[in-house]
Image (cartoon, grey):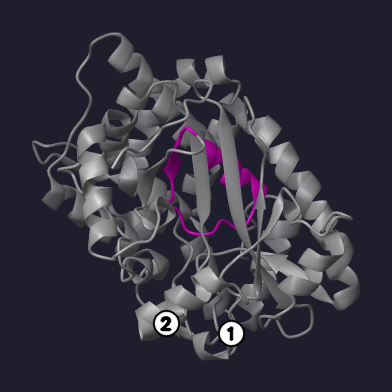
Amino acid sequence: MTIDFSPSARSTLGIEWELALVDTDTGDLRQVAQTVLDAVAPADGSQHPTIRQELLLNTVEIVSGVCRTVPEAMADLARSTALVREVADPLRVELMCAGTHPFGHWGSQKVTDKERYATLIDRTQWWGRQMLIYGVHVHVGIESREKVLPILGALLSYYPHLLSLSASSPFWDGRDTGYASNRALLFQQLPTAGLPFTTVRTWADLEHYVDDMLLTGVIDDFDEVRWDLRPSPKFGTLEMRICDGISNALELSAVAALTHCLVEKFSRMIDAGEPLPQMPAWFLAENKWRSARYGMEAIIILDEAGNEELVTDALEAVLADLAPIAADLGCEVALDGVREIIRTGGSAARQRMIAAASAPGDLAPVVGHLVREFHAGRPLDPA
């Protein structure tokens, strides 16, 4: 089959932020997404352009428009968030974001009444019902179809940097999993989810893969390719889907800026005829596991030679390398937020500190802390 790619203006940006709706008093999840969506819907009854439904009725997704800079995209998200809060506050509902809800039980959640969601649950059964997870997606515009998959391959080398920075799902169904990102390993249980195939190197390879998936009934359309990093042909972007849900604006803008700068860096390398970084599939899989397991304490594999380094040290080198590109893209302040994540140890560590200071088995204070970070727009000291 032929997959048309609609080129975008180079290094334009869009951000998608999945938010949990939690009870102000208990911290538990509330199934009121449809109430929120109905209240913000345009007069013609269509879906709000920047506030959208998701799989579960405890979730809304807010999205930016097509933006030139990270600060512009964050301002878009702030406007949408304020609109959601106008509806949520009278319901005594707070907004929260993390890779998972610390104690919410997956079996108690209601699925949005939409055919594609019903089809997903019917096919995936137990694993599909487990998808009580939240993520962040960052789209970066690509001006040429021929650049998309080479940049995707290069960005995979930075998978552990992005996942470690965002890892925020240490708890699942009220238990500490021992992982910094349980979401990353849970989500890959769905068909077509997880790491993209490193054998898909050209657009023709992608078309062959999608054709095979359609032929055998694995998918019904391209949107069901749920790779952690994937092309988005209709938007003309590369879509980064690696990250856990992020609790606050500072950390979200930092991860978005890092993604933005890396894609532009690789685009410039292609223009200059320089070789892009590559890593074998087995190192990519190991890096995903290490960053999911250890978060900001992960020792990651840096290159195809197998060199290793603590992710925080590796990030400092990346920030220095990307500084000129960040200046060109207008996201120097946002990118510097990576250092704040390093300083505070990441969301998974902060959540565990709150849990350790609370009564055994009581994770409501963890939810309270995540809600406070959402309000503050930055990571907060658990002490």
Where is 308 relative to 85, above or below?
above
Q: Which residues are magenta?
A: 236-256
Q: Position of residue 251 (x, y in %)?
A: 57, 47
- Name the foreground residue: 210 vs 246: 210
Residue 12 shows in this picture? yes
Q: Secondary structure at mark 1?
A: loop
Q: Earlier in the sequence, mark 1 or mark 2?
A: 1
- The C terminus: image quadrant: bottom right
Where is 8 relative to 219, above or below?
above
Q: Secondary structure at mark 2?
A: helix
Q: Marks 1 and 2, Cα distance to the nearest angstrom?
A: 15 Å
Q: Quadrant of residue 312?
A: top left
Q: Residue at x 29, y 8 (%)?
A: 272
Kind of residue at badge 1: Gln
Badge 2 density bin: few <14, some 14–19, many ≥20, Cα 10 Å? few
Q: Residue at x 34, y 56 (%)?
A: 297
Q: Quadrant of residue 37?
A: bottom right
Q: Which residue is mark 1?
A: 109
Any magenta on residue 242?
A: yes
Picture disc at residue 122: 2
Badge 1 density bin: few <14, some 14–19, many ≥20, Cα 10 Å? some
